[in-house]
Amino acid sequence: MAEILDKALDLVDLLKEETKTLRIQFIEETEKYALANYNQLLESDCNGVAYTVRGEWFAKSLNATRKDLANVRILNSSVDEYISAEVKKAEEHYSDSIVKLALRIAKKNLNIQNLKLVTSHIGVNIETIISDGVNSVTACTIIASGAIQKPHYRYLIK
């Protein structure tokens, strides 16, 4: 197990370098979504379950759902604070996914000293081929986002 962890640690920096464009694109999409979400919450007034007193938002219904209460908490921050918090979560997701990917690749017993990585974009998704000259592994992303869907992605390993 220690050998796999050592290989994974070596892979993390290589993968971060190869996936810079994914990180940039993911952060940009997260910022756009957070701004749109915040503005939508301001307009919707949390579907009638919130009110303001001196700029602070409060739930006005005992029947408010968890989502309504979460939306009220969002509105109690400024738009910049909310976007910053969402970007921080996106950065953490990116870092965590790189570590998980490195662990999965390390289990494939590739020779770390001879690795070559080739990354290509396929629409918004990326595909990275990791090869040691003998064996190869393909890692690709599946990205989902939209008007009501917060941007997120996962790696698939082939």
Image (cartoon, rainbow, N blue to C red):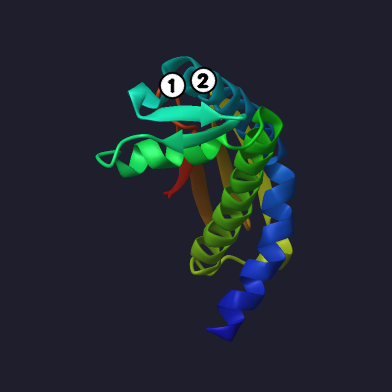
**On the picture, is 9 further left or further right than 42?**
right
Residue 54 point in image, percent of width and height: 62, 30
Q: Is residue 3 above or below residue 106?
A: below
Please report the residue visible at 53 percent of the width from the left and 37 percent of the height from the top.
Answer: 74
Please report the residue visible at 42 percent of the width from the left and 17 percent of the height from the top.
Answer: 44
Q: Which residue is mark 2?
A: 42
Amino acid type shown at disc 1: Asp
**Depth check, front residue: 81 or 136:** 81
Quadrant of residue 118 within the rendered picture? top right
Task: Work out whether residue 43 can be spotted.
Answer: yes
- Outermost residue on the left side: it is 63
Q: Which mark is residue 45?
A: 1
Question: How many labels, in total?
Answer: 2
Amino acid type shown at disc 2: Leu
Residue 80 point in image, percent of width and height: 70, 31
Q: Are marks 1 and 2 in contact (CB under 8 Å)?
A: yes
Residue 49 point in image, percent of width and height: 35, 29
Quadrant of residue 34 within the rendered picture? top right
- Outermost residue on the top side: it is 43
Task: Work out whether residue 152 can be spotted.
Answer: no
